[in-house]
Image: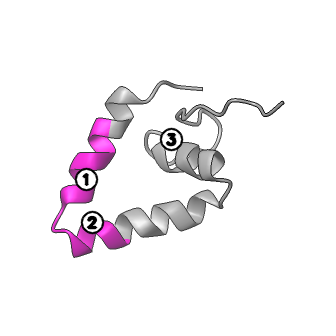
Amino acid sequence: MSELKTLTRSKSNRMIAGVCAGLGDYLNIDPTVVRLLFVLGFFTFNGAMLFAYLIMALVTPEQ
């Protein structure tokens, strides 16, 4: 049987709130790639990624 994966914020591999590390763990990719995509999205979408990051930091449970 497959194990159920849940999206959580990381407690050990965090820079600010652990959102990018949690996404990296959930998607099985390096958290640095997720952090770079967030920074790129911040400049591309005129700060909308900051709003998305804050919402995810508030809604996503901690590990």
Q: Position of residue 30 (x, y in %)?
A: 65, 61
Say which amino acid is labelled 2.
Phe
Q: Which residue is mark 2?
A: 42
User: Counting residues from the N terminus, which is met first, the one under dot 3 or under dot 1?
Assistant: 3
Give the residue furthest to the left.
Answer: 46
- Left or right of 39? Residue 9 is right
Q: Position of residue 41 (x, y in %)?
A: 31, 68
User: Pointer 1 and pointer 2: residues touching (CB < 8 Å)?
Assistant: yes
Quadrant in the rendering for residue 16: top left
For disc 3, the neighbor class at 10 Å (few under 14, some 14 to 19, many from 20) is many
Quote the CA–CA distance across marks 3 and 1.
14 Å
Query: What's drawn in magenta, residue-wise?
Result: 40-55
Q: Which residue is mark 1?
A: 50
Is 8 in the magenta? no
Q: Residue at point 59% right, 57% down?
A: 31
Q: Which residue is mark 3?
A: 18
Say which amino acid is labelled 1.
Leu
Give the residue furthest to the front.
Answer: 1
For disc 2, the neighbor class at 10 Å (few under 14, some 14 to 19, many from 20) is some
Q: Residue at point 54% right, 48% down?
A: 23
Quote the CA–CA distance across marks 1 and 2.
6 Å
- Left or right of 60? Residue 55 is left
User: Counting residues from the N terminus, which is met first, the one under dot 1 or under dot 2?
Assistant: 2
Q: Is residue 42 above or below residue 9?
A: below
Q: Secondary structure at mark 2?
A: helix
Which quadrant is home to the C terminus?
A: top right
Could you tell me if residue 11 is visible in this image? yes
Quote the CA–CA distance across marks 2 and 3.
17 Å
Say which amino acid is labelled 3.
Gly
